[in-house]
Image (tube, rainbow, N blue to C red):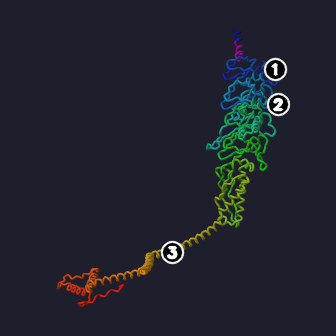
Amino acid sequence: METTLGILILVAIVILPSIRVIGPTEIGLVTKRFGFKRLSEDNPIAFHGEAGYQADLLMAGFRFKLWLLYKVEKFPWVQIPAGEIGVVIAQVGKPLPIGAKSAVYKPEFASFNLQTFIHYGGQKGVQRPVLPPGTLAPIHPVGFLVLTKHRVYGVPVSPDLMSQRGRGGQLTLEHFGLRPEQLNLTRIEPQHATAEGEVFDVVGIVTTYEGDPLPMGDIAGRLGGFEDVHQLEHQGRPDSELMQAILNTKNSLHNNYQDFQAFLDNGGKIGLQHDPLLYGAFALNPFLISVEIVPMLVVRQGQVGVVKAYVGLPSEDTSGTEFKFGSIVKPGHRGIWQEALRTGKYPINPRCYQAEIVPTAILTLNWAEASSTAHNLDRQLKQIVAKSREGFVFNIDLQVQIHVPDTQAPRVISMVGTMQNLVNEVLQAAVGNHFRNKLTSMPAVSFIETRQMVQQDAYEHIRTKLEEYQVETKGVYIQDVILPEELVRVLKDREIANQEIETYRRQKQAEDMRIDRERSAGLADQQKALAQAEVNVSIKENNAKARKAEADGEAAYVSQTGTAKGAEVRAVGMARAEAFKAQVDALGQQNTALVNAITSIAEKGAKFMPDILVLGGSSLDGATAALTEFLQARVGKPPSSANPAAPPMPEPGA
């Protein structure tokens, strides 16, 4: 009975403490308390039964390790949360070569299994790849330290780290010179510039901390250098293809710097890298790579980007011997590219290429208190202050419109450096000096009265000046002239006097016009009579002319027809005489006279026969005598004798 109890006690003391329960996400680190072999000085893990940390881990489940011989410590699996990375530091393996900062990585290392890592020649130190988000792996806690954003996995074997752990307990990222945010995925995404939600595009500028040194004279590394650009240029390709070759990155060769071993294998150099990172999330080793977020180059409509290249092939000037303002080169060479970037977005490294944005639309510059909202080039321009010949001080608000042709933009930048220099150094001096000199040479009033001419002179002066820099001048406009108070007072008094003079003159004109109007009204009132008189005069003149014409006509008629009338009367008289003679011979003188008298009376329409005629006899002589007596009474003549004499013969022409 006592023996059985002793055996049970022995079992409880020896066996039960040797049974280990390892959880599903735990590993058991075994430490052998003593052994016959000793570990090498540079290797903290026993692979062949030596005393110390054992290479084999206890996995999940019930495990037996005699506690008298082995100590078992439980550690969690390494887990990398979403959006974070894990940096692996190997505490075992071959030593790093002199100058190396990280260990060579081989695909066989996989998830850093300790046995495989040692078998394939893994090296101590920082491992080049990082553990991606979502990793869950049973990594040996002595073989490797794994740094994550919120904790450090593993047991340090370095004396310095062990002392830090001993004093403070847990290791932190600060012990390794890292910040928590460096263990996040590196994200390249649009940035919000202001609280109003304005967004701008960005790129990531990469700097590497390991690799061969850069070639002499280079400031940034580009895989393969610029040999591809040189080949395209040798083939005579246009500038646009050369520029496209430079803008196309070679990040696909190393998976955007995530495969740092591939980066080095392809000739990657230490330092600033030519090719930037574009939009995305990248698992980058913070010990080997840093990324700076900078704005992407955006060339908007109405602009060009003139590129100043600090990397590339040696400069070969293409501007000609007459151009004395620096080198103009083909794309891919150091210097100012002869071809500017047109409208677009370009992932260009601003540490390697400086792009000067040049407005190619008409640019309005204001010499005034308010500057243009479309650009900020005139922010340093102020009102022009000038003094007239009499000493009056003027403040002038001026507006100048200029235009830089897109094909000439590289030359303009080569001459002035920047558009800001063009405005501040060239235009500011040309405009200010012109107006100061102009005003000093003329009276203040003349400037005011000839403002348009002064503006035209300023235009010609500025146009000529800017032509030297291959910039076009589209217009010069004097917006406002702020006069000194004393001059304003003088001009105001003068203007008031002029206005009074003008008022008096207008009043006099009004009086003169009133007098003229009244005179015109009087004339209008007499106009009818005057018109009637003028008409009467005209009528009388016309009548007189008509009468004169009629008299002239009558005179001519009489003159022409007088002779004919006389001849006619004479002929008629002669005929009548002959007829009277024949009648006398036939009827006798008395009867002939009676017949002719009756005929004459009948022709006149007179009544010569009495209403009652009584004859005393039947003889013709009695009737004739009675009729003759009656006729004589009608004509008022005394009765003739019984035998009157025959009437005298009419005179010819009577």
Disc 2, SS: loop
* 595 left or right, relative to 465: left
What secondary structure do most residues of the magenta stretch adopt? helix
Q: Residue at x 39, y 81 (%)?
A: 567
Evaluate whether residue 533 shows in this view. no
Indicate the position of residue 409 as horizontal and vertical percent values. 71, 48
3D distance between C-alphas at marks 1 and 2: 28 Å
- Horizontal side of residue 630 vs 516, given as left or right: left
Q: Secondary structure at mark 1?
A: loop
- Magenta-highlighted residues: 8-18
Kind of residue at disc 2: Ile
| Classed neighbour count for the residue bearing mark 1: other residues with Cα under 10 Å, few (<14), some (14–19), many (≥20) | few
Location of residue 104 by image quarter: top right
Q: In terms of secondary structure, where does tag 3 sit?
A: helix
**Residue that badge 3 annotates:** 516
Asked if labels 2 and 1 touch by Cβ distance under 8 angstroms, the answer is no
Q: Depth check: 230 or 131 in front?
A: 230
Q: Nearer the viewer, residue 189 or 606?
A: 606
Magenta segment includes 23: no
